[in-house]
Image (cartoon, rainbow, N blue to C red):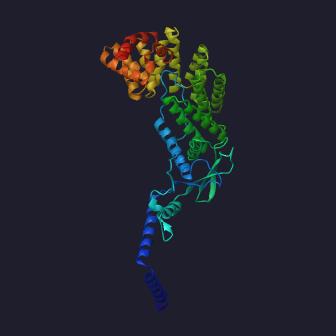
Amino acid sequence: MNGSLKPQATQRAAWIDWLKKVSWTTLALVVLAVLMFGYYYRKTSATTVLIIPGSFPQGLSPGFTTDELSSSLLSSLERLRRTAQSAGRSSQTSPANVELALGRLPAASATDPEYTTLRNPLPIFDTKVRGVSLGMLREWAVQAKVRQFILIDATAGRSGGSGFLLHAMLQDKSRFEIKKDWWVPRHGSCRSPLDICTNELAEDILAHEQPNRCLGYDEIGYSYLLKYQINRQIEDLSSAEDLYRKAIMCADRDPVAYCNLGNVLIRKWNAGGRVEAQLANDAVDYSKKALALNPQLAEAAVNLGYLEYVRGQHRQALDYFDKIGREFPTNQAVLLNSGFLLYREYLNGRSDLLAGAVQKTRSAWDLGPSFIAANNLGFFLYEMDNVPDSVKYWQEARRLNPDDPDVLGGLALGLYKSGQQKEAIALYREVINRDAKMKDPQNLRDSHFWSKKAVEDALPLIQAASSG
């Protein structure tokens, strides 16, 4: 027993001698360092992805600092996330157009991790005491906790003396191996503005987080398509197209990517005045490929039927929608398109088809809330002189999408016809403030497919709203 006490006494004496030699200031600094390290270690989530920008090669002056590079990447990641969140999962296509459906995504996104860099939050973090700074303690704690790092560097592959390639790699600390490399951008060298490079890197990073990495491109492309349907910015179509092409390169048997790429090309064809025939031809090919891979993907069939109709093959298109209507009797997109095309034929003189348009669209509405179905029913029932029900559906459409000028214009027309003229004029004045073209009768006919009856009934309303 005495033999075991002697080493303990010796150890205790050594500690006492050490404490006598160490100043209280040093001891306080050690305690503070331990507390700071523990604070940032506990504060950091293990799922955090640490962004570490490397220094640029000697002689390379890209026009921005490494801090600006990492900040741009963080901004790109956040912007893509906001795009997905704001777009949501319900289409906001204008009711003025046939509802081209987007291919259904097979899985939800993985939970997004937090991204952070090791930039010091305050100047005091750079101040060293006894060779150690708060920033160093923070860095050690974060690096000890996180499992993944995004290491960013610029290679010396310059073009014209000013360009360069941005290189990044995702490293998993738990196994100390590189999980993925990105070369950004894919073509040429990084050019100003900086987010041209970092946006593509951010897309790849977010796609990499998905349970199935290739499907991540579908997810982000889907968000850009929905964003286009809200804002009508052609740049969003270009981003969506690039992402769906990435998805196909990543997995060449992805039916959703082929379907939605066809959808993008149809929208580009429409936006360009339907001049570039190759866009429509490619859209047909991609939609057929999607159906070959997944015969149950009704959205790809909708693409094909829509293209046939707008290319002038009206009878064939209607027969095609009858066919896919039997194959997909409870698909909302098929019913919406079929009903709307019947209404288009009604506008062309086929008065016998209006009842069918109402029946198809009401079936689509019964499948679930859709402002497109509600708005279309408002216009269709107005043609049948059923103003009370048309107002009811327009109010439903407004509840689901309170900002769409076509919805608000239809509701204003219904209210005006119902005798609520003061409210109707105020509402149509709001419509004109949102979209000045809504006071042009020709625009209502050509772009929003208002009937001759609806336009003529709206003329005094438009005049009153415009003169107020």
Residue in front for this viewpoint, 301 or 451:
451
Q: Is residue 161 left or right of residue 223?
A: right
Which residue is painted at 50% across and 41% down in the image? 79
Which residue is painted at 61% across and 19% down in the image? 308
Residue in front for this viewpoint, 121 or 186:
121
Q: Quadrant of the C terminus?
A: top left
Residue in front for this viewpoint, 441 or 312:
441
Please provide percent x and percent y for residue 108. 52, 41
Q: Quadrant of residue 461?
A: top left
Residue with the most extreme bottom position: 2
Q: Quadrant of residue 32?
A: bottom left
Residue in front for this viewpoint, 16 or 22:
22
Please provide percent x and percent y for residue 448. 48, 18
Question: Does residue 420 show up?
Answer: no
Q: Is residue 312 above or below residue 75?
A: above
Q: How many marks?
A: 0
Q: Quadrant of residue 54?
A: bottom right
Q: Is residue 325 above or below residue 84?
A: above
Question: Does residue 273 show up?
Answer: yes
Please provide percent x and percent y for residue 126. 48, 62
Please provide percent x and percent y for residue 265. 61, 28
